[in-house]
Image: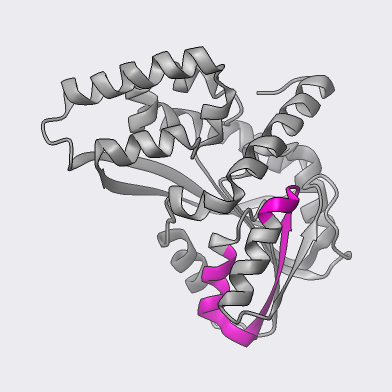
Amino acid sequence: MLNTKNEINKNKQSMNYHFSSIASKYRSIRTLDLEPVLYIKNQMNGKTKINMADVGCGDGRYSKEFLKYFGDKCFMHCIDYNENMLKSLENYFTEQNITNFCTRQGDANRLPIDNDSLDYIFTFNAIHHFEVPKFLSESLRTLKDDGHLFIYTRLRNQNSRSIWGTQFPLFAEIETRLYEFDELKQYIQEADMEIHSTRVFGYHRTSSLSRLVTQAKNNHYSTLALYDKETFKESLVTFQQNIKDNFDDLEQIKWTDENILIEIRK
């Protein structure tokens, strides 16, 4: 994990450049997991007039799913540090005739949201980009008294078992930003918040080698942007050979991904 302000600032600048460069194609290279969205929807128990925020929303893939399910029963604050991602979101939502949202360029450590105003906060695959204690403090400030925070992420051990962690050289070693559950639990307890539930989601993935190579070349995981050019080039060659050595059908490569959803109550 990042330990100093210099490291955090350097990582923020690097990631801002990375996300700016892939904003226009992010929707096409990333996988959308609908299961946690459906799970959260069921936890809401038919509430209406929901004020919610998607922090680290990126191009709005997950925000859109909530807006699709709830329609005009909710309003979504789409918050991200990267302006290019927010622009991509705005264009896409406009094309889809979605109007019950706003975009807010801002830092997860200082949310551009009023005190005690949100029913729900979500963050999908983004917590490792935040300073967790500050984000939790901001969540506590902006949530209503009965508000909920949902954190969807990969743990370090889950990442190491993925096809990237097992087959792409140095992937698990380079990705030092992810957390283990006990680390997140400690942060949550220190923020005087309560874990209401946790759920691990397992996904049986299928892809072709050409698709995986395309994703890698486009840095579909920000981890890949942490490689220097030569190391990435060498690792990609080795990755392709590893896949050929370990999978018989290069058009139907199968593996399992895992993520965890943590539900927190104020």
What's the residue at 51%, 78% (across, down)? Answer: 69
* Residue 202 seen by the camera: yes
What's the residue at 62%, 41% (across, down)? Answer: 21
Does residue 129 sit above or below 106 in this rendering?
above
Residue nearer the viewer, 197 or 16 = 16
What's the residue at 34%, 37% (across, down)? Answer: 212
User: In which quadrant is the C terminus drawn?
Assistant: bottom right
Q: Quadrant of residue 102?
A: bottom right
Q: Which residues are magenta?
A: 63-85
Q: Is residue 71 magenta?
A: yes
Whole-percent x, y for residue 234 in the image: 40, 13
Extreme-right residue of the structure: 115
| 106 left or right, relative to 122 | right
Q: Quadrant of residue 210?
A: top left
**How many numbered markers are drawn?**
0
Extreme-left residue of the structure: 248
Q: Quadrant of residue 3?
A: top right
| 91 left or right, relative to 192 | left
Whole-percent x, y for residue 204 in the image: 27, 47
Whole-percent x, y for residue 56 in the image: 67, 51
Q: Is residue 106 magenta?
A: no
Whole-percent x, y for residue 130 in the image: 71, 39
Does residue 112 sit above or below 137 in this rendering?
below
Does residue 8 sit above or below 33 in this rendering?
above
| 87 left or right, relative to 44 | right
SS assignment for the magenta stretch, majority: helix
* Residue 262 seen by the camera: no
